[in-house]
Amino acid sequence: MGEATTPEAAWKALDQDLADYLEKKGLKPSCRAGCFACCFGWVTLSRLEAEALLPHLTSAQKARLLEEGPRRLALLRQGKDDPLFPSRFFQGRTPCPLLEGGLCGVYPQRPLACRGLLTAGNPELCLPEARAPKGHFLPVPWRMARLRMEALWEEEKKRYGFLLLGELASLLYLLLQGLPEGREAVEATLEALGVLGGRWGYQLG
């Protein structure tokens, strides 16, 4: 796997891209340690990013993922075709199982989707009940993150022959449980769980 397309390299490159962009535009994000409203969100990442996270998980984090994973899979099974599913989940204020004392427990290894969600506005508007107004989250950082994600997706296709996208906690749970590598086996596993496809379910590409 090329150095430029490892998750670790993508995280570092995006951080630099964001710093350069924000400095150029004179923008100062209001996101701070202890501000974790976005950690209630439904975060999607690829298998490659999830696998890069695994070696950094503590025993306590793994235990929380093993407890939370089945619950999120059940929610997804019921809501993957519901257009409002992510919003309803966010408003339920269920914290990411990697959140510890108001801080990200894997901050240096947090996914690209988390890195790209920034605001220069009032952080209180990020809370689920605030229903952030249009333009509250900075669009360019998100597009930068998306481009980095897409590069990793292409690398994952080369490595595995297919792309797997899924929700952070449940995907880490499945990997901890021993998700198979082949496409047909992965597809069969996800179909048996009832979480493949739909508007918000796991996607194979």
Image: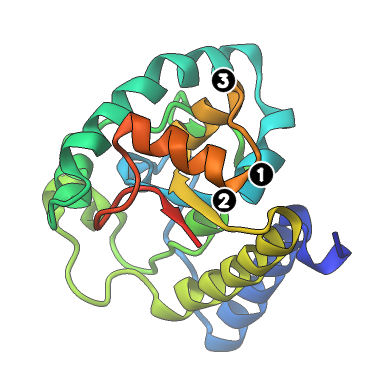
Q: Compared to 74, does 58 lie above or below? A: above
* Residue occupying the point 54% across, 44% down: 184
What separation in Å lies between label 2 and label 3 (alpha carbons)?
20 Å
How does the figure colour the protein chain or chains? rainbow
Regarding residue 92, the answer to whether it shows in the image is: yes
Mark 2 and 3 residues: CB-CB less than 8 Å, in contact? no
In the depicted structure, whether residue 87 falls above or below residue 40? below
Residue at horizontal 26%, vertical 27%? 74
| Residue 109 circle label | 1
Q: Nearer the viewer, residue 136 or 96?
A: 96
Residue 92 lies in quadrant: top left
Mark 3 residue element: helix
Amino acid tagged 3: Gln
Question: Between disc 1 and disc 3, whose residue precedes?
Answer: 1
Q: Whole-percent x and y of residue 156? A: 67, 58
Tell me which label, 2 or 3, sits earlier in the chain. Answer: 2
Instruction: Judge from the rendering whether residue 66 lies leftward or rightward of residue 61; answer left or right.
Output: left
Residue 149 lies in quadrant = bottom right
Considering the numbered disc 2 on the image, is that residue within a helix, a strand or a loop?
loop
The structure residue drawn at horizontal position 22% and vertical position 44%, both measured from the top left corner, is: 90
- Where does label 3 land, which residue? 177
Closer to the eye: label 2 or 3: 3
Name the spot of residue 19 as percent of width and height, x first. 64, 72
Dots 1, 2 in contact, CB < 8 A: no
Whether residue 116 sits left or right of residue 192 in the image: it is right
Residue 93 visible (yes or no): no
- Give residue 111's mark: 2
